[in-house]
Image (cartoon, rainbow, N blue to C red):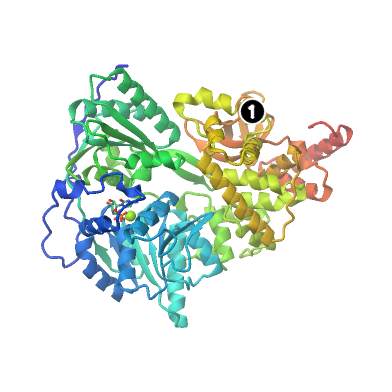
């Protein structure tokens, strides 16, 4: 295959050049000389040492001493000792995440209590905990541990605890003063995930209350690679900002001369231009937006490289996205064999939270997949949107960690200038129902007046409360109160609709099955479909496919997996992600325990899938859609929005009259993914009369919201009920 050339224009923006000395600890004297390439790049354990289980303690100790943060240790500890709250800023890779918690521990600032370090990403929490544990020469889960949703690897000896921000928030529900911790480090604060944003307010309140009550003080450290420091400092009562000297080499920035309509293709073209012109062993990092795009780019790159073999040095192509099996994720950290060039095609996961060595070129598509919430429609959408300038800068920075590098932006300089300065905090763009439920479980009922750093819009809070009201989790008082059902729902670390589905399952006598389905939905994809073996994968999984939807297929997969006791070969043959499947079984175990604690009877409906479908429809009644006779597309029942079945769904070909979905994804069209069928009659009129009245009322409320006249819908109900009585065996 021949790829046309793409010419680039050199960026004028001097901000990307010579950034190396912008970040220094205050009073550090004149900036230190730039670290030489040989010192910075070729650490003794090579690029794959990160995950080497036999890492030697002494070698890691040496490496720790070489980190840019090391010379600042004394000063940093001194400052942190004096401060209640500190903000620490330092380039990615300078050693903030791995070193600062250890420094606090070594200096005794932790006062024998636990230092909590939050991470927005599960992968980061786990890998960093492993690394720090190795650095201490200890077994993971002893001094250093981690705690992520559904997985707690800590013990009573744990003093440094890496955890996802969501986990700490959940813990705060049981202990709002966070008494187990002496220091809370909110890391990667610039990512502004919804949980970190809520934690800002929660830890700030905990610090104040502990002071008032004379309980051991709580130290707060906010860490990041880049951020709007004034905004953060103002929020934390003018907390001082400590700058760490970075190690950043100049990066030459190139822009596309004109806007690119197909950035995936442009990224491949650019890669081969670099590959033709530059010597091997200088690796390339490409930023795209998600699994499908990445897999398609990886396939094209491999095809082109195969066609051109002999004419160019060989390539080692590694995809990197959250849903990739972790063994394959680790491939990106492997050393590039001599004479090769490694190409990492990643989502924004490679922006700040994982450090990959050896990168000299960055190709930035300028796009990211983000959750976008429309408070009017009440829908959360995963949408490909433009990155912010701050993200663009971070991506560029990845090319200059070890030597001068280059960044190719697949957009024009003008397009760059038009980008938003910072990423809009997630709290201002996603469905807040889960967070509002958690805040209410924390005892904060007046959510509108909560101390948010950046307040979400009142409409989105009102919309979240109204969704919780529809689910029966809160009352319609002013301010709303948590109902007993809402309190039960808050005990599950899940989206409120999923928690509600679990709680409803006892009425349908199918809790066993619902637990299996919800567990599979709660982990990264259990399906493994490499682009190059797509047909083979689909054929192997055909036996699990159900015309009743993706949920029933997941149940079939779960049952089959249990049947073969999680056999690895079976997973391989059936293109099932074994690791994610194993996680799903652990998740299930924990959800089951929560049900047991709440004394919910756990029953199985056997093969009665209609009970499962009714239950799912009852929990997800807000996410129901009806087929359009004219267009073969669907419209959502609640908001009349046109939607389509995602091609990855097993229902893509069947097109049932009514469906419920878990997610909406917007690319060229608005797609529903993870679907189940829900013939309207089935979920309005089932065997349990009282329950069906509730569902009917809920369904009625959707129709009402969809502006169907009262008389019309009542008539519809009566008609359906009548038909159901006449033909009880049919889906009316
Ligand atoms: O947090 P920050 O980006 O400042 O740096 P860090 O995560 O503490 O990483 C410091 C150094 O530790 C990196 O440059 C990596 O070389 C190394 N590291 C690693 O080898 N494996 C990890 N899982 C994490 C860090
Ligand atoms: Mg970090």
Q: Which residue is mark 1?
A: 543
Residue 681, percent from left and from top: 77, 37
What residue is shown at x 24% (from left), y 19% (from top)? 310
Residue 429, percent from left and from top: 47, 49
Q: Is residue 388 above or below residue 239?
A: above
Q: Residues within 10 Å of mark 1 (few under 14, many from 20)?
A: few
**Is residue 354 at all visible to an observer of this figure?**
no
Mark 1 beta carbon near ligand 1 (under 8 Å): no
Q: Nearer the viewer, residue 660 or 458?
A: 660
Q: Is residue 354 above or below residue 557?
A: below
Residue 684, percent from left and from top: 77, 42
Q: Is residue 673 above or below residue 6?
A: below
**Is residue 693 at all visible to an observer of this figure?**
yes
Residue 293, percent from left and from top: 41, 31
Q: Nearer the viewer, residue 266 or 67?
A: 67
Q: Quadrant of the N terminus?
A: top left
User: Viewed as shown, does residue 119 lie left or right of 552?
Assistant: left
Q: Quadrant of the C terminus?
A: top right
What residue is shown at x 47% (from left), y 61% (from top)? 198
Q: Element at badge 1? A: helix
User: Viewed as shown, does residue 627 lie left or right of 179?
Assistant: right
Q: Nearer the viewer, residue 703 or 240?
A: 240
Q: Nearer the viewer, residue 713 or 692?
A: 692
């Amino acid at each position: 295959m021949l790829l046309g050339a793409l010419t680039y224009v050199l960026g004028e923006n001097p901000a990307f050049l010579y950034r190396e000395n912008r970040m220094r600890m205050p009073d550090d004297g004149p900036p230190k000389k730039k670290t030489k390439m040989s010192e910075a790049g070729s650490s003794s354990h090579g690029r794959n040492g990160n995950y080497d289980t036999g890492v030697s303690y002494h070698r890691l100790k040496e490496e720790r001493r070489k980190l840019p943060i090391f010379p600042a240790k004394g000063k940093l500890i001194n400052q942190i000792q004096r401060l209640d709250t500190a903000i620490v800023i330092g380039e990615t890779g300078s050693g903030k995440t791995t070193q600062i918690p250890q420094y606090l521990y070594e200096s005794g600032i932790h006062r024998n209590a636990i230092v909590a370090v939050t991470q927005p990403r599960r992968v980061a929490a786990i890998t960093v905990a492993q690394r720090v544990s190795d650095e201490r020469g200890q077994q993971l889960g002893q001094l250093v541990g981690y705690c992520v949703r559904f997985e707690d690897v800590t013990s009573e000896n744990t003093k440094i605890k890496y955890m996802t921000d969501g986990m700490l928030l959940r813990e705060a529900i049981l202990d709002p003063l966070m008494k187990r911790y002496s220091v809370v480090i909110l890391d990667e604060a610039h990512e502004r995930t919804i949980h970190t944003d809520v934690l800002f307010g929660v830890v700030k309140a905990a610090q104040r209350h502990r002071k008032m009550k004379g309980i051991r003080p709580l130290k707060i450290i906010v860490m990041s690679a880049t951020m709007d420091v004034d905004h953060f400092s103002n929020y934390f009562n003018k907390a001082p900002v400590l700058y760490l000297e970075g190690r950043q080499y100049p990066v030459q920035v190139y822009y596309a001369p004109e806007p690119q309509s197909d950035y995936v293709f442009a990224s491949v073209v650019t890669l081969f231009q670099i590959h033709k012109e530059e010597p091997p062993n200088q690796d390339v990092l490409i930023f795209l937006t998600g699994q499908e795009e990445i897999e398609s780019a990886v396939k094209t790159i491999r095809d082109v490289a195969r066609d051109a073999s002999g004419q160019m040095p060989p390539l080692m192509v590694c995809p990197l996205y959250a849903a990739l099996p972790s063994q394959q994720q680790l491939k990106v950290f492997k050393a590039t064999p001599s004479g090769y060039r490694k190409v990492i095609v990643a989502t924004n996961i490679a922006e700040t939270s994982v450090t990959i060595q050896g990168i000299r070129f960055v190709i930035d598509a300028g796009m990211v997949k983000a959750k976008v919430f429309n408070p009017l429609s009440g829908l959360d959408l995963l949408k490909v949107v433009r990155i912010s300038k701050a993200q663009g800068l971070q991506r560029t920075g990845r090319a200059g960690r070890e030597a001068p590098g280059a960044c190719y932006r697949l957009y024009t300089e003008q397009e760059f200038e038009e980008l938003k300065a910072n990423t809009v905090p997630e709290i201002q763009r996603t469905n807040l129902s889960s967070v509002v439920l958690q805040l209410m479980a924390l005892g904060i009922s007046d959510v509108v007046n909560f101390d948010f750093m950046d307040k979400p819009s009142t409409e989105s809070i009102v919309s979240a409360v109204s969704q919780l009201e529809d689910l029966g989790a809160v009352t319609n008082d002013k301010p709303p109160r948590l109902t007993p059902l809402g309190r039960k729902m808050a005990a599950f670390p899940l989206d409120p609709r999923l928690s509600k589905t679990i709680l409803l399952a006892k009425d349908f006598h199918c809790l066993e099955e619902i637990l299996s389905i919800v567990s599979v939905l709660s982990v990264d994809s259990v399906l493994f479909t490499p682009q190059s073996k797509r047909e083979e994968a689909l054929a192997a999984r055909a036996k699990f496919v159900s015309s009743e939807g993706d949920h029933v297929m997941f149940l079939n997969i779960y049952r089959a997996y249990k049947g073969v006791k999680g056999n690895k070969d079976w997973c391989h043959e059936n293109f099932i992600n074994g690791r994610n499947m194993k996680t799903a079984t652990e998740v299930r175990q924990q959800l089951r325990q929560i049900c047991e604690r709440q004394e919910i009877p756990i029953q199985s409906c056997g093969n009665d899938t209609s009970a499962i479908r009714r239950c799912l429809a009852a929990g997800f009644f807000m996410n129901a859609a009806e087929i359009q006779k004219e267009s073969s597309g669907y419209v959502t029942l609640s908001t009349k929005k046109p939607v389509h079945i995602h091609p990855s769904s097993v229902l893509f070909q069947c097109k049932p009259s009514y469906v419920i979905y878990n997610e909406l994804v917007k690319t060229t069209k608005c797609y529903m993914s993870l679907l189940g069928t829900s013939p309207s009659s089935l979920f309005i009129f089932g065997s349990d009369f009282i329950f069906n009245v509730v569902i009917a009322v809920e369904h009625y409320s959707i129709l009402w919201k969809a502006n169907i006249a009262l008389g019309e819908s009542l008539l519809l109900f009566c008609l359906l009920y009548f038909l159901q009585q006449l033909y009880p065996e049919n889906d009316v």
